[in-house]
Image: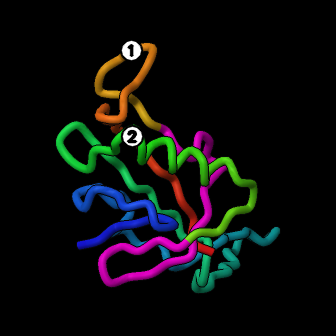
Amino acid sequence: MTISLNGIVLDDSIIWEERHQSAGVAQEVRRTLGGSAVIFSGSLGAGVPITLRAIENFGWISKDTADDLLGIAAVAGGVYPLIYGAENFSVMFRHEDAPAVELQPFLARQTHYSDDYFTGAIKLLTV
């Protein structure tokens, strides 16, 4: 399975955290002065969160890939194609849930090398 963000290929074992959660409906409940509930709901065409997570055992992110991800995350308002297997999405980084790219190196050192790896999260939002 291929997973890529704007052409940046990610490890095919990276975890999509919300993959099997219900996130396609928005709902708001308001109370009237008499205590009744008024419920507003609708389907989400966009705004569905996608968090890709590399953990200790799965989905490691190389330093070069981390640098590429941080580069595109630094573009304000950038919209990018996400390919997740046979599915295609248009996404942007969730900067309101900062940091949008949150990575921790396996080895803590001042200078990281191209063969170093990271774990952490890539926080996206469908548009």
Residue pointed to by mark 2? 120
Q: Nearer the viewer, mark 1 or mark 2?
A: 1
Residue pointed to by mark 1? 109
Where is residue 40? Give x, y as percent.
68, 81
65 sits to left or right of 79: left
* Circle 1 Cα neighbour tier, 10 Å, few/some/many (<14 / 14–19 / ≥20): few
Which amino acid type corresponds to the residue marked 1 in the rendered image?
A: Arg
86 sits to left or right of 57: right
At x 25% / y 62%, what residue is drawn?
12
Residue 96 visible to the viewer: no
In-front residue for pair 109/30: 109
Rendering colour mode: rainbow
In-front residue for pair 33/63: 63
The C terminus, quarter of image: bottom right
* Circle 2 Cα neighbour tier, 10 Å, few/some/many (<14 / 14–19 / ≥20): many
Residue 2 position by quadrant: bottom left
Q: CA distance from mark 1 to mark 2?
A: 17 Å
At x 51% / y 50%, what residue is drawn?
69
Q: Secondary structure at mark 1?
A: loop
> Label 2 near label 1: C-beta < 8 Å?
no
The N terminus, quarter of image: bottom left
Q: Which residues are magenta?
A: 81-102
Whether residue 90 appears in magenta in the rendering, the answer is yes
